Amino acid sequence: MFPRDVYTFFDEDEQTWRGRNVPPLCNPNQGVGQLVWRLLDRAPWKIAQISAETNRRVTYHEMRLRSIRVAQNLSAIVGIEKGDMVTIVARNNENVAPIVFGCFMLGTPMNTLDPGFHREDFAHMFESIKPKLVICEGDLVDEMVGAFEMVGIEPELIVFGPRINGYGKVDDLLVETGTEKYFLPVNIDDPANELAIVLCSSGTTGRSKGVCLSHSLCVANMTGIWTCYESDRVLCLSSLYWISGIGTLMTATAAGATRIITTVPFSAGMMISLIEQFRVSVIFFPPSHALAILNEPTIGMADFSSMRMVLCGGGPVSADLKRSFEMYLPKGRLHVVYGLSELGGAGCMSEIAYKNGSVGILSNGVVAKIVDEEGNALPFNEEGELFVKSQFIFMEYYGNPEATEEMKSEDGWLQTGDIARVDEDGLFYIVDRKKDIIKYAGYQISPTEIEMVIMKIPGVVAVCVTGIPVPGNDLPVALVVKALDSEVTEEKIIETVAENMVDFKHLRGGVYFVNAFPMTPSGKILRRTCRDIAVELYNETHN
């Protein structure tokens, strides 16, 4: 059974699809801090988070106290007021959540950046954001100071961990005030139009942009990204820079679930160990992590019996990857997630329905259409650009009206830049990024389409297809990561593509084996960097 007219609906007149008109889990007519202040007090004895490195457990009561103290001390000690910008650069340590919640309660907007950034990336964001306060990991102090000097700003700096060079430390924000029980979060007068958080666009094809999300959007779209229960133990390695990171924090907190946190970078062995040790029931990761786990030699002995839901997004998830991973989930399923920072959550998910290669159906409250170059809605199964909207979408790109206008239409549509199609049952298929399309002999080629063919070849672990620019054309080329014991060859890959695809999609740029791909901190392939690598390798072999 497919979900049309039950979970997803087609408007013949408008030629649009929409998810169910289900009210948000929480009332969006309030500030995020006002909501969190109440959520943390519902079941104070429950465990809110467990730190994997120390096994330190924090109850919802303790989380609430820490968050209130952060709000009070940010105001009293640092002088932060409603409207001041605070930047947070941190891994998932045990005090990140109370810092975030405390800022929400104080009504001060946040900008979350990834600790894996380079100094130039920090400076790029600081130049537009101009934070009054930066809170970062101790090992990033030199990078922060260097970035401040590059753009000529002098914000306050507070570090997680021990005091460094006289800078304040987060522990100072957690000291008792004696007035916690009298605290009330700052009232947000117009939550639909007041800034709560500035996330970043993924930056896979260029410099990141600051995605401004309102309080109403965060309350409506982030508190129910998936069906979460208070009995769940949730694991997500993404920092709060990513919508998956902040979305996991908000959804798990709204459900009263327990989050498993760690500051250790991803490895397949570590991830398997955490799932087994803490009996994780929900996990959120990119397809590159799923592939790495499947190629871990100990996967056959792993105990995934606690897992009921694997959420996988941030890149193409093939039907083969989904099926392969589900072989190790005796009680669970892998669900494909298509999300956007500008939407503040999931646009589509395969939790209700799935067909091979799809990203499922629209999430509750989301409307979408597929359009041609002129903006005309296309019929079923025709490829075009995906437009989406919901009651709340991002406000703007911080300090970048040109990019905002390019992304958001006058009538409220998000112009995603993704090439997609939708079938007659309302299931959506993401074909490629509009900017990643390869053009050869007048034809448009989807890199993902070629990648899916190559991924079926035994011994191929990962692949990125891009184009080599030559006069009048892009030559399709594949960068391939192969298994250590694999004997797959360049010729085998070229022949397989030639046998399965029309002539203009053949790998005229060749195949190059690499040890790994350049990745964003959350595991997305940096396609522009991969293209530069491919061009360099191509030029070396053709000079």
Image (spheres, helix red, strand yellow):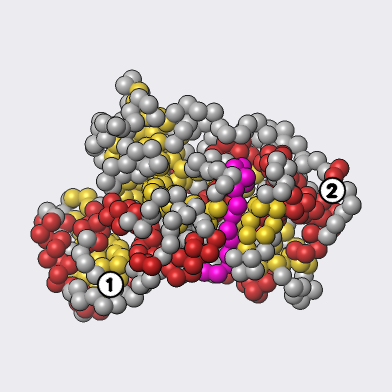
Q: Nearer the viewer, residue 414 or 25?
A: 25
Q: Nearer the viewer, residue 528 or 379?
A: 379
Element type where label 2 sits in the image:
helix
Q: Tell me which amino acid carries mark 2.
A: Glu
- What residue lies at 30% left-to-right and 53% top-to-bottom? 323
Q: Is residue 120 visible?
A: no
Q: Quadrant of residue 95?
A: bottom right
Q: Magenta span has 255?
A: yes
The residue to which callout 2 is attached is 180
Q: Give residue 202's position: percent from left, percent from top.
A: 47, 55
- In the visual, does 210 lie left or right of 102? left
For the C terminus, the quadrant is: bottom left
**Height in image: 409 above or below 503?**
above
What is the span of residues highlighted in magenta in the rendered image? 251-266
- In the visual, does 324 lie left or right of 472? right
Q: Which mark is residue 482?
A: 1
Q: Is residue 255 visible?
A: yes
